[in-house]
Image (cartoon, grey):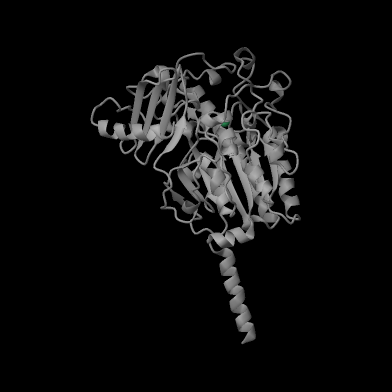
């Protein structure tokens, strides 16, 4: 009888241990592994992109709640990353004085996301590209941040000739946009980042306190360089081209689109006009090879978690700082307010959560990750946060915490304020001096999920526009 009671107690304990309730999770003080890709649009198996080879991320998705509608707050590295890292919206980060300033320039005393966990007893580590290139936030980490020396090129013909990529067009014109080099994973910096993070995961198994680890990979950011074995996973002829290669109809192109200057700044890329189809397909091939490379590196981290016995008590987050356009709407690169540039992949794998392996259409923002992760682990929230916790969505995929997701990108003297609701994307372009609305865009996702036709001036949506405009005003 006694042993039967014991048996029942063990079963009960196991059930409690595996339950999805908040208390169990808090009591376990879970580890957090937060992985960030760079410039990764939602071209992954979990989002229906069968033409992309991403087996490790597909496996992670099957253990996660997959967010179909997660959005960055600004489709460019610096503000997006500083935003989710600090918990502030891009407009609150302060003036960027140079490439080496972070949000600390104007907010020296707030706690960052990892720092908040550090202050609550987590052992925090950072690897690779987390803030912008070359930026660190030493106070956030329990041990010094690790970033390898930049290695952008590894193919023999490209070695030693090419300066570090930056926005200087003349310098970039020396650099190829992509290379396929017959090298190992750690011939590029992302492979070295993964190795260092793997070692830290192994070491963490012997530590009493839980860990909070952020690991940022540079790919699939330009240059689209990946070991040849990842290129070999694809048959170029079957790689799809952009379904809609022209700017959306009825937009003011002065604000809405750009001329892809950044991608055109690389060697042998045409300076104007549409990319020839053959080149477009080759660039997409390169981008997908980079996704498969990142996928393998993510797999190496997850394998290490499993091998060190920590997977069952680790929350895993996978996301990107923003999306990307690959010839869609005539655009190469990010820097817009469209769905393809603002939407990001987001998987959140919470031990024991009943939503694991399902997906949600709940709207969330990257700036929401700070309060969400803190709440999940039972921490109070610092006062400065500007996001909303979506913790309850992780236990109920039908739950909604937001009516809209907000993103902003400015161009040619106009502030572009964009919201995505269940049905619409609405963009309001306001003159940065007068505040007057100079252009509007409305895309009806019920009929136009590709955002190919701006219907803002068609009259039949005037009522919706009035409401959407009020909603934008609450966020700008
Ligand atoms: Ca980026």
In the rendered picture of this protein, how many numbered marks are placed on residues? 0
The answer to whether residue 60 is seen in the rendering is no
Depth check: give the residue in front, 342 or 158: 342
Depth check: give the residue in front, 107 or 289: 107
Horizontal placement of 112 versus 344: left or right?
A: right
- Give the residue drawn at x 39%, y 23%: 429
Q: Residue furthest left?
A: 460
Depth check: give the residue in front, 457 or 41: 457
396 shown above or below 451: below
Picture coordinates of residue 183, whole percent (x, y): 70, 33
The answer to whether residue 436 is seen in the rendering is yes
Horizontal placement of 185 versus 53: left or right?
A: right
The part of the image, by quadrant, that contains residue 471 is top left
Q: Residue furthest bottom?
A: 1
Picture coordinates of residue 405, whole percent (x, y): 43, 38
167 shown above or below 92: above
73 shown above or below 63: above
- Give the residue drawn at x 71%, y 38%: 139
The part of the image, by quadrant, that contains residue 444 is top left
Quarter of the picture holding the N terminus? bottom right
Ligand number 1: quarter of image: top right
Quarter of the picture holding the C terminus? top left
Picture coordinates of residue 419, whole percent (x, y): 40, 34
Picture coordinates of residue 209, whole percent (x, y): 71, 54
Depth check: give the residue in front, 50 or 301: 301
């Amino acid at each position: 009888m006694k042993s039967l009671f014991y048996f029942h107690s063990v079963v009960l304990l196991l059930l409690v241990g595996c339950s999805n309730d908040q208390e169990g999770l808090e009591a376990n003080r879970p580890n957090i592994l937060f992985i960030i890709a760079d410039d990764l649009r939602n071209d992954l198996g979990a989002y229906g992109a069968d033409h992309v080879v991403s087996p490790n991320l597909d496996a992670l998705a099957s253990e996660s709640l997959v967010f179909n509608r997660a959005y960055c707050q600004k489709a460019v590295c610096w503000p997006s990353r500083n935003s989710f890292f600090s918990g502030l919206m891009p407009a609150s980060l302060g003036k960027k004085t140079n490439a080496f300033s972070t949000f600390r320039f104007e907010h020296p005393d707030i706690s960052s996301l990892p720092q908040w966990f550090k202050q609550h007893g987590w052992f925090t580590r950072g690897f690779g590209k987390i803030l912008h290139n070359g930026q660190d936030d030493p106070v956030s980490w329990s041990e010094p941040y690790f970033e390898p020396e930049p290695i952008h090129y590894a193919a023999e013909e490209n070695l030693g000739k090419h300066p570090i990529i930056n926005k200087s067009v003349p310098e970039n014109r020396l650099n190829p946009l992509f290379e396929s080099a017959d090298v190992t994973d750690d011939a590029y910096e992302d492979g070295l980042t993964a190795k260092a993070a793997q070692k830290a995961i192994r070491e963490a198994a012997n530590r009493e306190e839980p860990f909070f680890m952020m690991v940022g990979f540079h790919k699939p950011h330009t240059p689209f360089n990946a070991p040849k074995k990842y290129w070999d996973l694809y048959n170029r002829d079957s790689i799809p081209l952009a379904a809609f290669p022209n700017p959306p109809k009825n937009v003011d192109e002065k604000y809405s689109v750009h001329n892809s200057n950044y991608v055109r700044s690389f060697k042998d890329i045409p300076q104007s006009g549409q990319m020839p189809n053959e080149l477009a397909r080759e660039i997409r091939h390169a981008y997908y090879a980079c996704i498969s490379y990142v996928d393998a590196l993510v797999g190496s981290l997850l394998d290490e978690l499993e091998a060190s016995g920590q997977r069952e008590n680790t929350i895993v987050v996978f996301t990107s700082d923003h999306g990307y356009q690959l010839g869609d709407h005539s655009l190469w690169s990010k820097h817009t307010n469209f769905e393809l540039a603002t939407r990001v992949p987001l998987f959140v794998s919470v031990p024991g959560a009943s939503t694991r392996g399902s997906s949600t259409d709940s709207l969330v923002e990257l700036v929401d990750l700070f309060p969400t992760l803190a709440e999940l682990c039972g921490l109070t929230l610092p006062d400065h946060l500007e996001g909303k916790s979506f913790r309850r969505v992780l236990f109920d995929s039908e739950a909604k915490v937001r009516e809209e997701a907000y993103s902003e990108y400015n161009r040619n003297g106009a502030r572009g304020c964009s919201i995505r609701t269940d049905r619409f994307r609405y963009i309001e372009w306001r003159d940065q001096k007068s505040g007057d609305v100079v252009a509007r865009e409305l895309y009806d996702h019920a009929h136009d999920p590709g955002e190919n036709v701006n219907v803002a001036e068609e009259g039949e949506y005037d009522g919706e526009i009035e409401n959407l405009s009020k909603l934008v005003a609450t966020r700008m």
